[in-house]
Amino acid sequence: MGGYAFDCNQSFDLEQETFWTKTQRITLTPKGALLLASCGHLPEITSQEIADKSKVDELGKLVACLQAGWFTVQIISRLACGLPITLLEVTVVGHVVCALVLYALWWHKPRRIEEPTILRGPWTGPLAAFMVMLSHVDAAPGSMLPGFQVEQQTLEITTLKFRIEPDDGTVQGETLSNGEQELDKIDSSLQVRTKTGLSLLYEEEIVIKDTIVDWRGQAEARLRLACLAIQQHSAVRTLLRRPICETDRKYASALAAYPEMPKRCRKKRDREAMLQNMSPWLECDAQNLVTHTASDWPHDGLVRTTGGLVMGTVLWVASIAFSAVHIAAWNAGFPSEAEAWLWRFSSMFIGFSGLLWAFLHIIAELSASLWWTWYDIMIGEASQVLTMLVTALCSMCGVIYILARTFLVIEAFVELRSLPTMAYAIPQWSVSIPHVG
């Protein structure tokens, strides 16, 4: 796990009002750590401390790499001597290539750091409350859309907006309500601050967009502390934005979900041009600043997202390379003709799927209409016929891909029942070199 975390028993002042009890610890995402650094509260940790926590076994890595390298040399020498290669060896070669690349990229990556660095100080309460309200850790559950994506959860911060007061240049947190009246334009150069002593004591729950938001108890404490964080830290105030026009909300949501959106899909105006300069209200954009547990998978809490084209290219190039290794065994000594053609079809389909998706990624990068069509399918706004068609095709290709990969692994072991005699021969030069295995 590791990382930075707020601990309810260690981070916060005992005299401070309780605002969170669902979990003992709240772990910061990379975006949360960046905000903490911008506020000047990120603890200094040396590389020696990280290395001391890491449980990396470099000797074990070296031995594994030497063993994989020795296996690769053996395969090359067998080919040079004209000896047959078994399907199991072909399968292992594909995994060896992937393993060597991963070892090279992750050689200095810390591993198995269980305990995070606990954040302490009088500043932790307001910032932790603000991050919780801005993140998904306390959001109302979303619903599944007709497409593939789960509808965005309702965050506590979306039920707030901050009003700029023309008389003293302050910003006051209030709850959203229907029928809000537009106010006159105010001076945008006023410093954004929050009023202290907000009175938001409600006797009953408030229903906002079919979601019950309870402002009493801990939720009310989070509100007060979040407003205090906005007042104390200028870095937090940079997250306040004027509300986006309703006509541009879809474009803004797509841009927030896919920052790597192709230039052809972007409108000629930037995001700031979409903001209503006439509105006296400021809102907070939803950001994944904290989470329950740290994750190694890509998520929206990363400081820099990996571009869809880059991610897709890497994944499908790896798939094509894996396919090429198995296609190389086209004329291997299969036990039967049926197994030979199943092996060839499975190998070619894996490569075909990689080429197909790489082609679609490139086309989507060049065609704005195709990119937006795919986005409409993802958010459930495309026609039902198109959504069902794409779902059926993707499901069918996915099932065939899984079956193809499974067959390659199974066939590698099944072939062992009838190996040619020369498969047991080894190059003579390797006998004179001391080795294990």
Image (spheres, grey):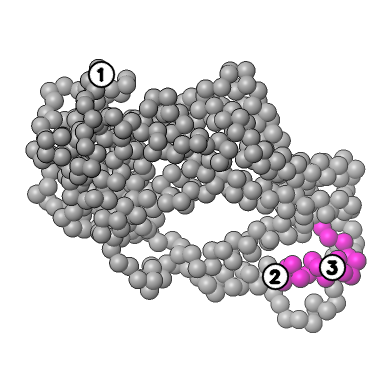
Which stretch is magenta? 69-86
Q: Secondary structure at mark 2?
A: helix
Write down the quadrant of residue 437 in the picture: bottom right
Q: Position of residue 268 (x, y in %)?
A: 50, 36
Reading the image, the residue beneath label 2 is 69
Amino acid type, callout 2: Gly
Vertical order, 263 against 117 (above or below): above
Q: Secondary structure at mark 1?
A: loop
Amino acid type, callout 3: Arg
Amino acid type, callout 1: Asn
Q: Residue at 27% across / 51% down in the picture? A: 235
- Answer whether residue 263 is magenta in the image: no
State how far apart marks 1 and 3 are (Cα): 76 Å
Of the image marks 3 and 2, the number of the one nearer the N terminus = 2
State how far apart marks 3 and 2 are (Cα): 14 Å
Of the image marks 1 and 3, the number of the one nearer the N terminus = 3
The local crowd at label 1, few if under 14, some if 14 to 19, many if 20 or more residues have their Cα within 10 Å, is: few
Give residue 178's mark. 1
Give residue 78's mark. 3
Q: Nearer the viewer, mark 2 or mark 1?
A: 1
